[in-house]
Amino acid sequence: MSRNRPKDLSSRELLARIGLSDDAPTDLLDDAPLEDLSGDLGAALRERYQSLVRRHPFAPGDLVSWKPGLRNKRIPRYDQPAVVIEVLDTPALDREDEAGSTYFREPLDLVLGVISDSHPGRGELFTWHFDSRRFQPWSEAE
């Protein structure tokens, strides 16, 4: 009895099928250039701290984006807005068990909606929880 098995894919064919190929290269680790931090690292740390503690009042329907230098997740990209779905009165704490993780006990108090720009789900609205301290109001100029 013959089975209709898909033919075995080469690694190149598999990568092309999931959207990674020489024709459309994707940097899996970062999609935005890192600014030069070779200057005063202490000043950069203080600047990031001040940005992190500067709060913005958000409401459902607001468009937001990452504050510069505070993105800790791949989605949304720096140049991609997200819509506020909900602001949680009591933050959910990230359930990451490892104290060494950057997500350990991160207060997730913002539910954001992002339209996926990759397959599967291209064009669909997905929601995720985020730390609101890392976001600012979005502007077209970004």
Image (cartoon, rainbow, N blue to C red):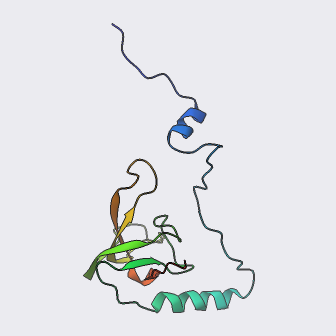
Work out whether residue 73 or residue 19 is closer to the camera in this orientation and state it: 19
**Which quarter of the picture shows residue 135?**
bottom left
Farthest residue to the front: give it: 140
**Which quarter of the picture shows residue 56?**
bottom left
Q: In this rendering, is residue 90 above or below 111? A: below
Work out whether residue 126 or residue 40 is closer to the camera in this orientation and state it: 126
Q: Quadrant of the C terminus?
A: bottom right
Work out whether residue 96 or residue 111 is closer to the camera in this orientation and state it: 111
**Measuring 61% from the left and 42% from the top, which residue is drawn there?**
21
Farthest residue to the top: give it: 1
Image location of residue 4, percent across then percent down: 37, 17
Farthest residue to the left: give it: 89
**Measuring 39% from the left and 81% from the top, which residue is drawn there?**
132
**Measuring 41% from the left and 91% from the top, which residue is drawn there?**
55
Q: In this rendering, is residue 124 above or below 15? A: below
140 sits to left or right of 24: left
**Measuring 56% from the left and 39% from the top, which residue is drawn there?**
16
Image location of residue 115, percent across then percent down: 39, 61
133 sits to left or right of 141: left
Q: Quadrant of the N terminus?
A: top left
30 sits to left or right of 76: right
Image location of residue 64, percent across then percent down: 42, 78
